[in-house]
Amino acid sequence: MELPFAESYKIKMVETIRKSTREEREQWIKEAKYNLFNLKSDQVFIDLLTDSGTGAMSDKQWSEMMLGDESYAGASSYYKLKDTIKELLGFEYFLPTHQGRAAENVLFSSLVKEGDLVPGNSHFDTTKGHIEFRKATAIDCTIDEAFDTQKLHPFKGNIDLNKLEEVLKNNPKEKIPFVIVTVTCNSSGGQPVSMQNMKEVKALAEHYDIPVVYDSARFAENAYFIKEREEGYADKTIKQIVKEMFSFADAMTMSSKKDAIVNMGGFIAMRSEEWFRNASVYNIMFEGFVTYGGMSGRDMNALAAGLREGTEYDYLNTRIRQVAYLGEKLTEYGVPVQKPFGGHAIFVDAKRFLPNLPKEQYIAQTLAIELYLEAGVRGVEIGTLLADRDPKTRENRYPDLELLRLAIPRRVYTNNHMDVIAAALKNVYDRREEITSGLKIVREAPIMRHFTVEMEHL
Ligand code: F0G
């Protein structure tokens, strides 16, 4: 008999989680103004709000914490991380930051100015936020296939080269500080970018003399998909693939809370000494001195170890197979989900799930609330709330996709938890005809409103 698949780790420490009753959840979500970010964590049974900073560190990472050097300047932990980044990712210069959006803030402060255009593949909301905050514009050049959840394409994160060229050739190069490639592309469903596409984007950008920056939060998961799906990579190690990926980038921003499996941290890495010098000024102003930039020494040590572990095939295989396990269960139950399954999350197609709700009633948020009420499972809306209003017209922007994201924390839940999540969504799906009204906004922030929005049931 062929041996079944099992996780590439065993469990050394556990944390108790608590179930609740539907009545309790009804009360709590009302008090939370129908915003899942307002719930207390002990009001949640299975927390799929994000895979960011929610992973379980390994025994090796924890032991590295004890070796942290907390010197203000020149800490050995800084050099350990610098050497790891050079070895694994190939960048000469790096700046630590406290998380991914801080890396964006520092780098964009030195590169993006009013009126600029930043083309890329479905920019993540903080990335777009940091562009728009500087009165510049993010232009989405993702391939059209990404916007049909049922269309199978191995690399739905890819940039459409024609769309990109339109931007590059019709604008002066001074207005385009860089092209940004998000690997994997979170906003289009945790979908990977192919090596071929990275190569072509770099060649096209180079032709117009424009640098390329990678938003790298889930670069290792992207490398796993390249190994599994792209011709010529099956026999390469993840570390070889990662090195090749970054050879097509001039710089990267990193939220280490994802693929580096730490609870807090980020960095910028780059080839240009000039970029490093310019960004260092902002790093010192916003984050901290260049050798710690918002991170303690122990955290830089754990991050260095996490980068090594996060680029191991066995770990990634366990991780991505668990996400696929949930996706397959949901598919078996008829629940419409983004296909192929993403690397860090399953994305439920809320428009197909609740076809009778008008888009003005926040379809994906309505579904997220229903799932929470059903079983205490907390997902997150990736739809109209997240898309914010148009900065000029102040009208709601209705994205092509209304998704409920079920992000799976790394090394945290078992497949029994996946079974509960799938059954809960099936139950909601079975009673979908009864869900006839959605939500309205009563209060919202001018930018990144989904974190703090207050809503009411219609
Ligand atoms: N880029 C991508 C692709 C991201 O997914 C995130 C964060 C960031 C940048 C910002 O990093 O949170 O460390 O400041 N994504 C989280 C999520 C929040 O839930 O997907 P950060």
Image (spheres, rainbow, N blue to C red):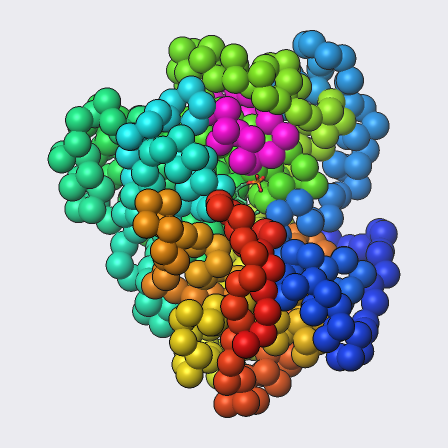
Q: Position of residue 154 (x, y in %)?
A: 35, 59
Tell me if 180 is positioned left or right of 78 in this view.
Answer: left
Residue at 73% across, 48% down = 56
Residue at 52% across, 12% down = 281
In the picture shown, does residue 72 fall above or below 403?
A: above
Out of 99 and 117, give the one closest to the viewer.
117
State which quarter of the image contains the N terminus: bottom right
In the picture shown, does residue 302 fall above or below 410?
A: above
Is residue 156 shown to the viewer in this render? Answer: yes
Q: Position of residue 28 (x, y in %)?
A: 75, 68
Q: Position of residue 44 (x, y in %)?
A: 75, 64
Answer with the quarter of the image where residue 284 lies.
Answer: top right
Q: Is residue 259 magenta?
A: no
Answer with the quarter of the image where residue 306 lies.
Answer: top right
Q: Quadrant of ligand 1?
A: top right
Tell me if 141 is positioned left or right of 5 in this view.
Answer: left
Residue at 17% across, 46% down = 162
Does the magenta stretch mainly form a helix, a strand or a loop? helix
Q: Which residues are magenta?
A: 83-107
Is residue 152 shown to the viewer in this render? Answer: no
Q: How many marks are shown on the rendered structure?
A: 0
Residue farthest front in this picture: 442
Out of 86 and 14, give the one closest to the viewer.
14
